Image (cartoon, rainbow, N blue to C red):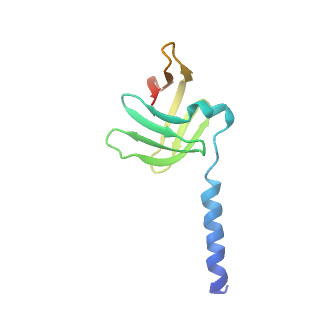
Amino acid sequence: MPKRLLTPLLAVLFSLTLFSCQQPLENEYLDYIGSWGSDRYSMEIWKNGRGVIEWGVRDAQECRVIIEDNQIKFRGEARRTFDIDEPPYITTEGYWVMILDGDVFYLH
C-alpha cells in the first residue's frame, strides 16, 4: 500500500476506535452525572459516558463509565465495579445521595 494512503487510513481507524469506546449515558441514568464522594472514594461521572475515579493512594484515573445491571463500572487503567444499593435521590435536607456497596456518596 502506498505510504500516502496509509497515514489517512490509520487516522480514520484511530478515530473510529476512539469514538466507538465512548457511549453517552442513557437518559434514565442522568441523575448519576456529577462529582460524588464518600469516605473512601471520589468519582465524577460525565454525560458522555466517561468519568474519573480515585480511591486510597491511587491517582485519579479517567476511564469509561458503564451503568447497567444495577452496577456502575469504571473501565480503564483503573477498574472498579460498584453495586447500586440505592440510586441517586434527594434527602429531606435537600442533599443528593446514592449508596454504592454500602458506602454513602454525596453529590458535591
Position in image of residue 45 (x %, y %): 53, 39
On the rendered structure, is 41 left or right of 16?
A: left
Position in image of residue 82 (x %, y %): 50, 32
- Compared with residue 45, is residue 99 higher up or lower down, i.e. above or below? above
- Compared with residue 17, is residue 32 higher up or lower down, i.e. above or below? above
Q: Residue furthest left?
A: 57
Q: Residue at x 65, y 62 (%)?
A: 16
The C terminus is located in which quarter? Answer: top left
Position in image of residue 26 (x %, y %): 67, 38
Q: Residue at x 54, y 19 (%)?
A: 90
Q: Residue furthest bottom?
A: 2
The N terminus is located in which quarter? Answer: bottom right
- Compared with residue 63, is residue 18 higher up or lower down, i.e. above or below? below
Question: Which residue is nearer to you in this view: 92 or 19?
Answer: 92
Position in image of residue 70 (x %, y %): 60, 29
Q: Residue at x 62, y 85 (%)?
A: 3
Question: How many callouts does the rendering have?
Answer: 0
- Compared with residue 40, is residue 60 higher up or lower down, i.e. above or below? below
Quarter of the rendering containing residue 53: top left
